[in-house]
Image (spheres, helix red, strand yellow):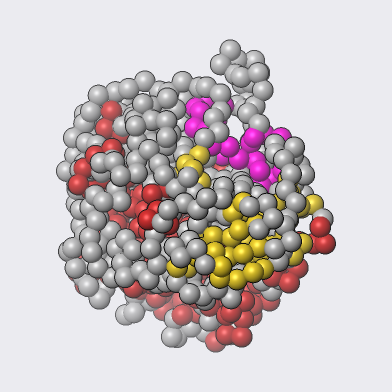
Amino acid sequence: MSFRHLKSRPLLVSVFVLGALGAAACDSGSSSPPPSATTAGTAATTGGTSASAGATGSPATSGSASGGSAGSVNAGGAAPMETDVPAPAEPVSKFIVLDQFGYLPDAEKLAVLRDPEMGFDAADSYVPGAKYQIIDAVTKAVVSELTATAWNNGAVDMTSGDRAWRVDFSALTAPGVYYLLDVDAKVRSDLFRISDDVYRQALRHAFRTFFYQRAGMEKKAEFAGEGWADAASHIGAGQDKNARLFGQTADATTERDLSGGWYDAGDYNRYTAWTADYIVTLLRMYEETPTVFGDDFGLPESGNGQSDLLDEVRFGLTHLARTQSESGGCISVLGVASGSPPSAATGASVYGPESTNATIRAGIAFAWASRLFRASDAAFADELLGRAKKTWEWAEANPAVEFKNTGKVAAGEQQSSEKEVGLFKLGLAVALYRADTAGGLAYKTYFDANYAASGLSVLNGYNAAWELQLTELFLDYTAAPTADAGAKKALVDAFANTIASADNLGALAGDPDPYLAHVADYTWGSNSHKARTGSLQYDVISFGIDAAKNAEARRAAERYLHYIHGVNPLGLVYLSNMGPSGAYKSAATFYHMWFVDKSPRWDEVGVSMYGPPPGFLVGGPNPSYSLDAVCPGNAACPAAPPSPPSGQPPQKSYASFNDNWPVNSWAVTENSNGYQVAYLRLLAKFVR
């Protein structure tokens, strides 16, 4: 399938839009020049504080609401926040890493001790002490005494360049704030919480990033925080409300209202297929964990009696509907101008033509939404089902219409391969079969006749998170009450057999990664791959594959969450600006056309006035990172690529920087809504 790691970026980006389901109010702003390229930085949010902590720019207080759902900050929590507890006298050691937010009471709890042998920190050294203590940070009482166990008999892990040990404190279940102390060296871990509500703030901020990504909608200070308030973007003359077709921009008859939707990533473009994928994943997580997403996340729609997740999905669906023509086809991509803040963008918006790939994937989103909105809004559900059926009809009549946008419109290549389009069409058949309870048997017949020869990896003995979305679209068939028994058994058996592999649940016994979150390869967007791998393990539970494996699946999935929260060689929470929410060291900067390099307001936490908002998942370690292909032959090129991320073991191939071309930091730090939904879905499984 298409992934964000295929994205390439010109310095100047253009965009296009369409319309059908409703609109949001908006304003336009003045233009600003693109940021200049500089050398890489290395800062991170540290010490449990940030530039925005307690400031009017912080959304921790803006738009807040009370209540018992995950949207409420520390609602009903049995343990105080780490930020409310005085720091202990012992210094924090970068060689002791754990989940910086903390752990659920009944969770596995493993701290990792690290001695660097390879990479940028190879000159550093750590020798584990003979004794470790868990200290209650409030009472100062010693809760337990523990010893460290060497990973892999003291071998060096080649993915991280580290020798490692672990300290197991899973027996600690009492709510509170604690730290792990190396008694001999008198150094400690960051503070961490044990509590049922331990991940609520992370969920709140991670979900609210979709609000900051909204196009064509004013971001009022009461919801965004004063630091990130902005007028509506891309609504001026020739922009999203009047977007024109690529190659025919002089033809006014091609104008379409394509306003709304979400900025896709660090760029402001909108890719129909990917927008649809985000909607499906949001709806999937709502179906899996409906009580987690309440009506109090501090959004303009909060308090309307409907889950804020469904409100956010509806915002995305409004734009997605605008991409669809009366014939049922959907435009492929909308390319728009950049600016910081987004309202400063003034360039024209341009859209790519309809494609089979975009149409099919939009249809899946329409069908999913029809099914999940039916209980609360039958008329809306009927409209969505009609749209989904039209996409099927269009795809039947136009089975191989492609548009490859690279070098033409927007930044990322959204066109899938012929094989992938066929797999998504089978996914659309399943989604329509489940949504159309009156006439969906024709879609079932299509799936029954074609799934076995589809080439889906899990049916051919290989199960990896790169194909998670497609695997789950096929597994959705097993939830239909009239599913063919033979097909259902074939899908369940194929998943059960492949999830037991050494790269999946088998990693619990094989233990190939000292940081407990094994993936076979590190590539562009590795943090998203980690999150998807966690959800893949949890699918044993989500799809009822094998109840005897549920405990293993949950334990395996949770380890990938801990990796993102700090159990990694950098001791870094891979979320932006989370100091006020308990992180000792979180991402201080990342590539985004709003939070640009050298911006006095948004560039970097602790350096600029506000830094970026909290909760964005950054791309993650990428050992394939390099300078742009024009280097070294361009005057803008630095003498050498920044190291890190260059020239490091895979897990250390990361740096906190947001430089534009030709340093191309987007290959390492850029956010993506695709990364965000992958993390949110995994996180939601562990929110109480």
Q: Is residue 301 left or right of residue 262?
A: left
Compare residues 426 and 305 and report the one nearer the observer.
305
Q: Give the residues in magenta.
A: 644-668
Residue drawn where x is 60% and y is 40% of the image: 654
Q: Is residue 41 left or right of residue 462?
A: left
Residue drawn where x is 58% and y is 76% of the image: 171
Dividing the picture into quadrants, the one containing residue 435 is: bottom left
| Residue 189 visible somewhere in the drawing | yes
Residue drawn where x is 47% and y is 45% of the image: 47
Residue drawn where x is 63% and y is 36% of the image: 645
In the image, residue 194 sits, relative to residue 54, either above or below, namely: below
**Residue 452: x percent and y percent?**
62, 72
Report the predominant secondary structure element of the magenta stretch: loop
**Residue 284: x percent and y percent?**
41, 67
Dividing the picture into quadrants, the one containing residue 632 is: top right
In the image, residue 528 sits, relative to residue 606, either above or below, namely: below
In the rendered structure, does residue 658 fall within the stretch colored magenta? yes
Compare residues 585 and 247 and report the one nearer the observer.
585
The quadrant of the rendering that contains the C terminus is bottom left
| Residue 476 visible somewhere in the drawing | no
In the rendered structure, does residue 216 fall within the stretch colored magenta? no
**Residue 271: x percent and y percent?**
41, 45
Compare residues 652 and 51 and report the one nearer the observer.
51
